[in-house]
């Protein structure tokens, strides 16, 4: 509703005032927005509708390679193995007997039916399908005439007790089966299926569930594991953001209601923030970029940041309106004073998030760029929609002003905090320094671990299945080693196969590594069979021709794809496949470094190169190595961006240090908490630093600009700080509370990744706000930096030269960057 008479008179007056000299660019802009408020409002809504239509293009997709450090040697090895042999979408199924062992017709029948259903799936790589009943899993039998015969371990059709006993005997006699396809205690059987990595994980997970569902009963426990299962579960938890986001809207709305005590002022920041979210996600949909676990949390962060900036400008609007009693003039004055600060803080935050574009992980780059885009969208909306909408709404009534300006508990707390810090600045800094020292002592205790399964609670079915499979079977974490020959048939050289066999033995020296299979094992099995099953003949033949004949014989018996899971048709590229019972960072790093040293010695002089390591262990070790390096680089990047921009805006390097100090304190505090609490550093917690720095920079910028503004009216720095804490400090308290409470909602998600992310982000933002109000204020009292007084000196110089009425003096005040405060509420 528009109050037409007052609106027309105010518009005419604003038109006359637009001719005032010394008008700043922000005042010109503000007056233009006010004059064209209806058009601005309409254009904002139109853009929102157009971008909102693009939301239909959003889709959830947990992309495996998007979470990898693309340039790391381990990741490059894994990608090459995937291109040659598959192995990126490996599913592990364990069939565990609840009583007795698996060697009975009922349980082996379950294994057989599950394997057959997997074979019929169009996306399975059949040559890589391993189980007791898989067609490519063959036993080698020596005949009396010296020939050998290869046939499937389990024949097609129903099983009887006699066939089960034959299977048991074959498993116990064959090293390739014993411990690899059947557990050592014979109570569990493993099925390993490799799928085309182009299939979506959620579709694959659903297919696996449908395949094993008919076989579940009280005789067996069927557990699943593997990267696609983990990613599908990750996608399921990510979808819960559709529930958490509305809850965040409610929580942030309640915080804003407490801030303003009016429904109108509560709704306007929320509407603004929601428009910003729609803009950011709409652009993402327009670009057809998929949502993943990281981008799924950006709406909450954009909502909190956008609403926070809206609180700052609306708080100032009510403050100005209490003085002018003219709504349009209050809009202009609030934009002139807060607008440049908002632009500075917003662009610094956007720059901090955009710095993630240098991160080596694609999903983190997308996360940072989406947040930067969201903050820029928020700035545009807040500098157009808010003032236009505020002009179109009725001016606040007396009762609304009384409720908004009424004393509340936060005012008393901030007043006490301000008096304490101003009276005892040294004590405040000593306490802050003590917190920093204690926190810093915990940083060396931080452990780096990027195990995807640790993103989930131990009570989830995924973790329960994983623990059971690791207990019974060779493991659920994959390890791959790539052998690249210099020429075709390089792998038929005895020396090469012997080195591969030795590498396998070295891998299995650690009891946590099992299920190791390569082309060397198949050659040794064939050589043993050709020598009448003599255990001493389980070795690599000494001549190349014999090895070539064995491989040819195998392909004739099993088809050209019989060994395609282990060696290419040209016998030039091979892969060693292994499983591990753990993928923890300390174990993986130590194992891979040991294997690299072994390879350097054992394969020296051979016509092959060895790539270590693909699979889960290699990928996660690469992430562990990269996260530490990338985190350190990113902290320096964000800090440099904030320092340079603040030094430029404040025209002071000391001022930039003032902005950085509470942020570095918050970083140290957060890292200290992680160290002392045993929270590991991973890809999720690494991103928290950037989030905290970029959000926390706003607090110091708003506070310092308000102190500078207050000094234009008074030479008393303590008074200026006290007013700044009571005004901007109140907005900081509400903004930080909104972010903290919004992120604490993630703690109740039940998803360990988001629980850590929510708790640590909330802690860092809270510490940034508290350090800003205390450390920055105390340092200002003690040091009295010149950059705080510079605008006041310029303002008084301008006013000394000025002549004319009150409007001229107001314009000159705006030109210096601040209006003189005439009242103190």
Image (cartoon, rainbow, N blue to C red):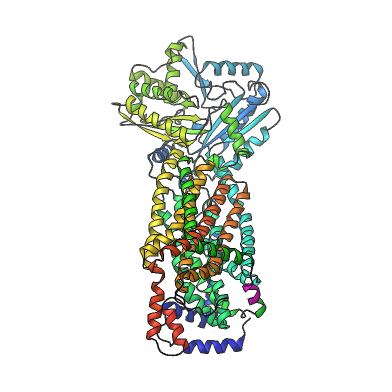
Residue interval drawn in magenta: 401-406
Whether residue 117 is visible, yes or no, is no
Quick check: 96 above or below 645? above
**622 and 486: which one is in front?**
622
Residue 559's spot in the image, x, y percent? Answer: 46, 28
Residue at 44% in and 64% down: 780
Residue that protrudes farthest toward the left in the picture: 605
Residue 391's spot in the image, x, y percent? Answer: 57, 79
Residue 374's spot in the image, x, y percent? Answer: 50, 62
**108 and 680: which one is in front?**
680
Quick check: 217 above or below 438? above
Instruction: Write down the quadrant of residue 310 in the picture.
Output: bottom right
Location of the N terminus (image quadrant): bottom right
> Would you say residue 795 sits in the magenta stretch?
no
The answer to whether residue 618 is left or right of residue 413 is left
Quick check: 16 above or below 648? below
Quick check: 805 above or below 309? below
Location of the C terminus (image quadrant): bottom right
Instruction: Write down the quadrant of residue 226 in the picture.
Output: top right
Query: Would you say the magenta stretch is mainly helix, strand or loop?
Result: helix
**3 and 429: which one is in front?**
429
The answer to whether residue 180 is left or right of residue 538 is right
Residue that protrudes farthest toward the right in the picture: 218
């Amino acid at each position: 509703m528009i109050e037409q008479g007052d609106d027309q008179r105010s518009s005419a007056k604003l038109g006359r005032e637009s001719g005032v000299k010394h008008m700043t660019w922000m005042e010109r802009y503000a007056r233009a927005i006010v004059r064209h408020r209806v058009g601005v409002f309409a254009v904002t809504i139109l853009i929102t509708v157009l971008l909102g239509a693009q939301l239909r293009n959003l889709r959830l997709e947990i992309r495996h390679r998007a979470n990898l450090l693309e340039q790391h040697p381990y990741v490059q090895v894994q990608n090459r193995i995937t291109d040659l042999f598959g192995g990126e979408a490996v599913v592990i199924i364990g069939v565990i007997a609840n009583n007795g062992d698996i060697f009975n017709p009922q349980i082996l029948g379950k294994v057989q039916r599950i394997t057959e259903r997997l074979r019929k799936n169009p996306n399975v790589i059949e040559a890589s399908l391993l189980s007791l009943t898989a067609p490519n899993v063959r036993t080698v039998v020596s005949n009396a005439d010296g020939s050998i015969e290869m046939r499937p371990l389990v024949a097609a059709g129903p099983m009887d007790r006699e066939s089960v006993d034959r299977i048991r005997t074959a498993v116990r006699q064959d090293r390739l089966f014993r411990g690899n396809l059947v557990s050592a205690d014979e109570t569990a059987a493993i099925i390993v299926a490799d799928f085309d990595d182009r299939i979506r994980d959620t579709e694959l997970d659903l297919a696996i569930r449908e395949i094993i569902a008919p076989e579940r009963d009280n005789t067996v426990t069927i557990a699943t594991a593997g990267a696609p299962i983990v990613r599908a579960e990750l996608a399921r938890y990510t979808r819960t953001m559709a529930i958490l986001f509305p809850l965040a809207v409610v929580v942030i709305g309640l915080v804003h209601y407490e801030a303003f005590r009016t429904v109108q002022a509560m709704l306007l920041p929320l509407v603004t923030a929601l428009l910003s979210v729609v803009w950011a996600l709409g652009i993402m949909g327009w670009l057809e970029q998929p949502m993943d676990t990281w981008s799924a949390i950006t709406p909450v962060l954009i909502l909190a940041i956008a609403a926070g900036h809206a609180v700052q400008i609306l708080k100032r609007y009510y403050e100005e309106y209490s003085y002018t009693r003219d709504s349009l003039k209050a809009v202009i004055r609030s934009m002139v004073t807060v607008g440049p600060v908002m632009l500075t803080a917003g662009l610094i935050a956007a720059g901090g998030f955009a710095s993630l574009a240098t991160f080596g992980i694609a999903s983190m780059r997308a996360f940072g760029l989406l947040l930067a885009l969201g903050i820029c969208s928020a700035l545009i909306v807040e500098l157009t929609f808010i003032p236009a909408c505020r002009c179109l709404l009725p001016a606040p009534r007396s009762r609304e002003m009384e409720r908004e300006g009424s004393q509340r508990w936060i005012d008393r707390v901030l007043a006490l905090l301000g008096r304490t810090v101003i009276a005892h600045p040294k004590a405040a800094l000593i306490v802050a320094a003590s917190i920093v020292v204690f926190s810093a002592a915990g940083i060396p205790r931080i452990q780096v671990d990027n195990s995807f399964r640790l993103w989930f609670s131990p009570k989830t079915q995924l973790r329960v299945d994983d623990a059971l499979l690791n207990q019974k079977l060779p493991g659920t974490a994959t390890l791959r080693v790539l052998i690249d020959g210099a020429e075709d048939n390089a792998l038929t050289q005895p020396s090469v196969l012997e080195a591969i066999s030795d590498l396998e033995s070295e891998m299995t020296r650690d009891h946590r590594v099992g299920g190791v299979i390569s082309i060397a094992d198949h050659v040794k099995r064939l050589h043993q069979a050709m020598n009448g099953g003599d255990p001493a003949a389980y070795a690599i033949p000494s001549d190349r021709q014999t090895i070539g004949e064995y491989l040819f014989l195998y392909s004739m018996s099993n088809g050209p794809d019989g060994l395609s899971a282990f060696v290419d048709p040209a016998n030039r590229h091979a892969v060693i496949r292994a499983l591990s019972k753990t993928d923890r960072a300390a174990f993986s790093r130590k194992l891979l470094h040991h294997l690299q040293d072994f390879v350097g010695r054992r394969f020296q002089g051979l016509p092959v190169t060895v790539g270590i390591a693909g699979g889960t262990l290699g990928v996660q070790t690469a992430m562990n190595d990269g996260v530490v390096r990338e985190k350190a680089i990113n902290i320096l990047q964000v800090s440099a961006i904030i320092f340079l921009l603040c030094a430029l805006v404040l025209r002071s390097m000391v001022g930039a240090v003032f902005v950085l100090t509470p942020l570095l304190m918050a970083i140290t505090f957060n890292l200290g908490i992680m160290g002392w609490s045993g929270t590991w550093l991973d890809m999720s917690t690494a991103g928290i630093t950037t989030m905290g720095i970029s959000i926390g920079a706003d607090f110091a910028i708003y506070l310092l600009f308000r102190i500078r503004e207050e000094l234009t009216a008074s030479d008393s720095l303590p008074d200026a700080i006290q007013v700044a804490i009571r005004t901007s400090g109140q907005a900081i308290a509400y903004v930080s509370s909104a972010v903290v409470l919004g992120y604490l909602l993630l703690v109740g998600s039940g998803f360990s990744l988001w629980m850590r992310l929510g708790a640590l982000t909330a802690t860092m933002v809270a510490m940034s706000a508290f350090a800003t109000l205390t450390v920055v204020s105390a340092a200002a009292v003690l040091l009295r930096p010149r950059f705080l007084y510079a605008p006041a000196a310029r303002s008084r110089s301008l006013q000394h030269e000025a002549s004319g009425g009150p409007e001229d003096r107001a314009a000159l005040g705006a030109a210096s960057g601040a209006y003189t405060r005439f009242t103190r509420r």
